[in-house]
Amino acid sequence: MKGVAENFLVVLAKDERAARRRMAWSVAIMATLGLLAWLLVDRRLEGAWFGTGLTSFLTAAFAGVALGALRARLKYHHRYEESLRFSWNRWMRFSVSAPSAHAIFRQVAGRAPQPSVWKAALALAFVLFASFVMMVVTLLDPSTALNASAMFVLYGALGGFALSDAVVFGHWARRFRLEVTEMVKRGELPVWGVV
């Protein structure tokens, strides 16, 4: 099976591996942040407030997972597949040089292959700076520990969102790669444009 469709299958296989790596990193980072929530918030609170940091972190993580899964399902199962149905030839053409399905989708839609990251970088820098300040204040004054749980709510929501996006995208890439492979083997999908 040589041709442009094979390049697309290679891109999907790479995306599967990348999604698994993102899942592993998301779980590791969320476990670390959960531990920090427990150490910086729960260990400093007593009485009725004990457990607030980890509980709020986990609750936000589950909410992030749910919202991330809904968004990812809409993006990958609806937008990507609709684009594939209407622009199959363009997807195959761009798969020759594109590093991922995300880049192919952006090119087919007429956008730059890589999204602009300055807004995300600015937001991340703000979150990291605010987190650093909140951790220092919490370490210096234990009575502010309850305020620090707000940062862990944000961490939990963002981590859960990233985790579910990776899971849904990995599932989509695997399912679609297997379907395209079967269609090529059965001859339902021509392998054109030998590279």
Image: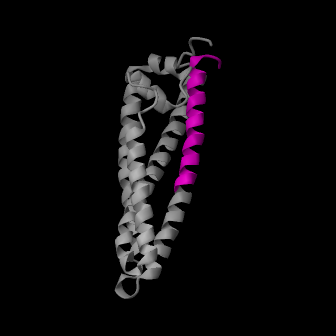
Magenta span contains residue 24: yes
Q: Residue 144's spot in the image, x, y percent?
A: 36, 76
> Which residue is at the front of the view, 107 or 126?
126
Asked if residue 54 lies left or right of residue 21, the reply is left
Which corner quadrant of the image does residue 47 belong to?
bottom left
User: Among all residues in the image, which is located at the extreme top?
Assistant: 193
Query: Taking 139 as reference, is 3 above or below it?
Result: above
Residue at far right of view? 1
Against 15, residue 3 (above or below) is above
Picture coordinates of residue 7, whole percent (x, y): 59, 23
User: Can residue 149 be seen at all in this image of the molecule?
Assistant: yes
Chief SS of the magenta region = helix
Q: Residue furthest bottom?
A: 47
- Identify the residue at image location x=42%, y=62%: 131
Q: Nearer the viewer, residue 115 or 163?
A: 115
Q: Quadrant of residue 52?
A: bottom left
Residue occupying the point 38% across, 21% down:
110
Viewer can see residue 41: no
User: Which residue is nearer to you in this view: 111 or 132?
Assistant: 132
In the rendered view, tell whether residue 189 sits above or below residue 121: above
Colour scheme shown: one colour
Question: Residue drawn at (48%, 42%), measured in percent from left and top?
Answer: 169
Q: Quadrant of the N terminus?
A: top right
* Residue interval drawn in magenta: 1-26
Task: List x then y, in percent, for residue 156.
Answer: 42, 61
Q: Count up the numbered dots.
A: 0
Residue at horizontal 52 percent and vertical 20 percent from the top: 188
Name the quarter where the C terminus is drawn.
Answer: top right
Q: Position of residue 42 (x, y in %)?
A: 44, 78
Q: Is residue 25 magenta?
A: yes
